[in-house]
Image: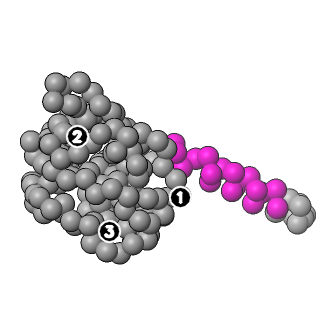
Amino acid sequence: MKITKKFVACGLLYGVLLWLTVPAAVLSARETERVPVMFLDANGRELCRFEAELAITPYEQSRGLMYRPYMPPQYGMLFINERDEMQHYWMKNVSIPLDIIFIDGNNDVVYVHHNAHPHDETTISSRYPARYILEINAGEAKECKIKRGVSTRFGRTAAGK
């Protein structure tokens, strides 16, 4: 059988299309798992809800939202740590402006850093010990009235790790 340039080009195109559609099907359970994160007012009423991708392993946490060009509204990444500690983040290789919400082991917001700038390598500190960190699109924390002292509830297994 004679292999022509057209045959090779069609094969390459098919391979690229397959590569673009298959990754979603072969992602690990962790990469596709989402957990709801709810913020509650003083009366226990829901202020806002986000669907969050989990970042638990050292690799997941070091990669975070790097190299992503976009994040849908009401979506985020939830970093889960073993205990309450001072947390430090930066925006190296992150292209999306973010609000970074630091939450302690009692599920209370201890600090909100608004509008972290893309690619900024300045350290962003939790200011208080925190166990959970939720990164969301910049501006959503203000829209949802998320501030220090607001209570949080996690769906499924996020809080129970």
Residue type indicated by callout 3: Trp
First in residue order: circle 1 vs circle 3: 1
* Image position of 18 (left or right of 95): right
Please say if the residues under marks 2 and 1 sit with CB atoms less than 8 Å apart. Answer: no
Q: Position of residue 33 (x, y in %)?
A: 36, 40
Task: Look at discs 2 and 3 and give the one toward the viewer.
Answer: 3
Q: Which residue is mark 1?
A: 69
Front residue of 19/130: it is 130
Q: Compared to 51, does 4 lie above or below?
A: below
Quarter of the image with the N terminus in it: bottom right
Q: CA distance from mark 2 to mark 3?
A: 23 Å
Front residue of 45/87: it is 45
Rendered image: mark on residue 158: 2
Q: Which residue is mark 3?
A: 90
Quarter of the image with the C terminus in it: top left
| Circle 1 SS class | loop
Q: Is residue 46 magenta?
A: no
- Give the colour scheme of this rendering: one colour
- How packed is label 3: few (under 14 Cα within 10 Å), some, or many (20 or more)? some
* Image position of 99 (left or right of 20): left
Q: Position of residue 70 (x, y in %)?
A: 52, 53
Can residue 125 be seen in the rendering of this structure?
yes
Residue drawn where x is 26% and y is 67% of the image: 124
Residue type indicated by callout 2: Ala
Q: Position of residue 92 (x, y in %)?
A: 39, 71
| Circle 2 SS class | loop
Q: Compared to 117, does 76 lie above or below?
A: above
Can residue 31 be seen in the rendering of this structure?
no
Q: Main secondary structure of the magenta part?
A: helix
Highlighted magenta segment, given as a residue range: 9-25
Residue type indicated by callout 1: Pro
